[in-house]
Image (cartoon, grey):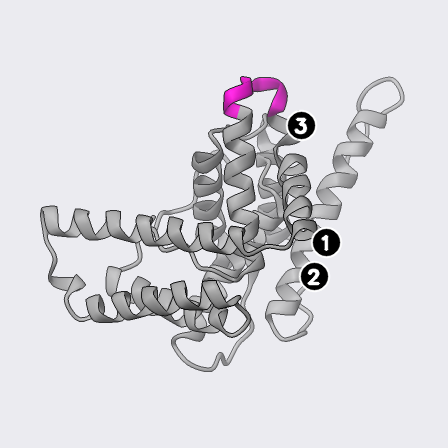
Amino acid sequence: MNRSGGPDGRGVDVQTEAIDAFCRAVEAYLCRRNSGHLIRIAGPSFDRVRGWATRGIPIKVACCGIDRYVERQQLKGPRRRPVLIDFCEADVMDAFDEWRRAMGVKAPVSSGSERDVDPEPARRRREPLPAHLDRVIARLTVARAGASAALDVAIDAAVRELDAARSVVGLLRAGARTDFLSRLVAIDHGLVTVAAAGLEADAARTVRLEAEEEVAPYRSRMTSEAYAEAVEASESRIVRDRCRLPVLELS
């Protein structure tokens, strides 16, 4: 890797070290999701993950994208082959797009050369609504096992409603489909709200600190109001991750 830069090269050293750390973290997480099987990220795959880092994708968001792909494959039955990082690209970019929209920020501009960033976005894939509900219901069922009493109740109600809708959502058209998608957003918001209210004081403070750290790189470009909204959105995402809640909104 080219580490030359300013007079002492230190600026590019720091950037390169951060990118290398990001790639190692993604590789380690992918191995864990593959039940401990060692999956090396090298060659074109390394360039792909390096592109995620230069785009400014937070490591937790990249891991969220990996989770989405792995969980979708698990619903199809036992895996015969390990998941490769290349297969997760579209889900990682979807998760990043959602994260940016929620926080109202743009990705930082890389200080490296233009070729450090893949200019073409990943191909978007819209999951069929029935399949989306199957995945959401499965994840909510798992989340319930470790939930608080209040969140248990909220999850049970959500699962019953989604399960009842599962047989008809494929037939919804126009306004009825739009109304149902809006209902998914409302259920999602309600679950995260209940989960956040159930956090102990120490956990709530930790979530706040993590959210502020996540938004910190963008703060100089934000108004006070935008910054507050971004931190709140980041808190919601962190709470979701802690409580293993899926994203109900169909992106």
Mark 2, other Cα within 10 Å: few <14 / some 14–19 / many ≥20: some
> Which of labels 3 and 1 is toward the front?
1
Q: Earlier in the sequence, mark 3 or mark 1?
A: 1
Secondary structure of the residue carrying numbered label 1: helix
> Which of labels 2 and 3 is toward the front?
2
Q: Which residues are magenta?
A: 219-226
Horizontal and vertical percent for residue 167?
17, 71
Read off the residue under disc 2. Answer: 28
What's the distance in space between the residues labelled 2 and 3, CA to CA?
Answer: 25 Å
Residue at 43 percent across and 47 percent down: it is: 94
Left or right of residue 193: residue 167: left
Left or right of residue 201: residue 169: left
Read off the residue under disc 3. Answer: 112
| Residue 102, placed above or below residue 11 | below
Horizontal and vertical percent for residue 232?
52, 37
| Residue 238, placed above or below residue 72 | above
Q: Which mark is residue 24?
A: 1
